[in-house]
Image: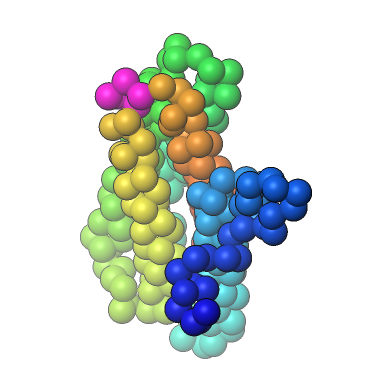
């Protein structure tokens, strides 16, 4: 059997057949959940490296701290509300109910969109104050860290939009439950990352 045949069969996704039982997945959870957890680990490493680089760069003499826009506090509140609404949607989906599920899930995404809009407004305020990406290292890192976080938000919103369409089209709760659970997990992760980044930016 060739190596190409082995790869095509994806034998690593199956356990051995014992006693005539059908082969099952190598993990006891949905592959989408495993993929998301793996992605979150990678994203955590990326954000950690950026944060370490931020602190190392601060030690050089050309570092000139910038004043964080006050809007970041309001934006943080928007992201907290978004995460709360996603958790509400997950609780409803886990109970098998449809009551308020659309309000909670779609509302969570709307507040996430408002968060990104708020971040864009904060960047505009910095530009108006004379701070640009290449103005100084502190400004560069500010735009880098908040920009990378925003990109992750946009990726999550793409998945959220697909799940929202399925929910609005009348799909059964059991068919969208996993998507809602994964979106909720992802948004909690993004909230934690943002709180850490916000604390770092505000105190340095």
Q: Which residue is painted at 32% across and 47% down in the image?
A: 158
Q: From this viewpoint, is residue 20 visible?
A: yes
> Residue 28's x, y, as percent?
67, 47
Q: Does 109 appear in magenta?
A: no
Question: In the image shown, does 151 or 35 lie closer to the viewer?
Answer: 35
Is 66 displayed left or right of 55 in the figure? left
**Which residue is most to the right?**
19
Q: Which residue is painted at 59% across and 81% down in the image?
A: 56
> Residue 81's x, y, as percent?
48, 32
> Residue 197's x, y, as percent?
53, 59
Question: In the image shown, does 82 or 169 lie closer to the viewer?
Answer: 169
Q: From this viewpoint, is residue 202 visible?
A: no
Q: How is the image coloured?
A: rainbow
Quadrant housing residue 129:
bottom left
Q: Against 180, is 140 above or below?
A: below
Q: Which residue is painted at 69% across and 55% down in the image?
A: 17
Say how many tags the image has. 0
What kind of secondary structure does the magenta stretch mostly adopt? loop
Tell me which segment is drawn in magenta: 167-171
**Which residue is most to the bottom?**
61
> Residue 73's x, y, as percent?
47, 44
């Amino acid at each position: 059997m060739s190596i190409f045949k082995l790869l095509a069969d994806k034998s690593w996704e199956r356990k051995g057949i014992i006693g005539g039982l059908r082969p099952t997945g190598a993990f006891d959870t949905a592959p989408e959940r495993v993929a998301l957890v793996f992605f979150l680990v990678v994203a955590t490493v990326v954000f950690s490296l950026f944060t370490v680089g931020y602190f190392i760069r601060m030690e050089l003499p050309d570092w000139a701290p910038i004043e964080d826009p006050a809007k970041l506090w309001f934006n943080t509140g928007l992201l907290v509300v978004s995460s709360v609404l996603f958790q509400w949607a997950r609780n409803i989906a886990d109970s098998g109910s449809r009551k308020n599920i659309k309000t909670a899930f779609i509302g969570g995404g709307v507040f996430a969109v408002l968060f990104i809009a708020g971040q864009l407004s904060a960047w505009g305020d910095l530009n108006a104050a004379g701070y640009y990406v290449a103005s100084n290292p502190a400004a560069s890192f500010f735009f880098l860290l908040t920009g990378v976080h925003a990109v992750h938000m946009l990726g999550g919103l793409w998945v959220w939009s697909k799940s929202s369409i399925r929910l609005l089209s009348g799909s059964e709760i059991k068919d969208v439950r996993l998507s809602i659970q994964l979106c909720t997990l992802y948004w909690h992760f993004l909230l934690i990352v943002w709180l850490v980044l916000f604390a770092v930016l505000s105190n340095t």
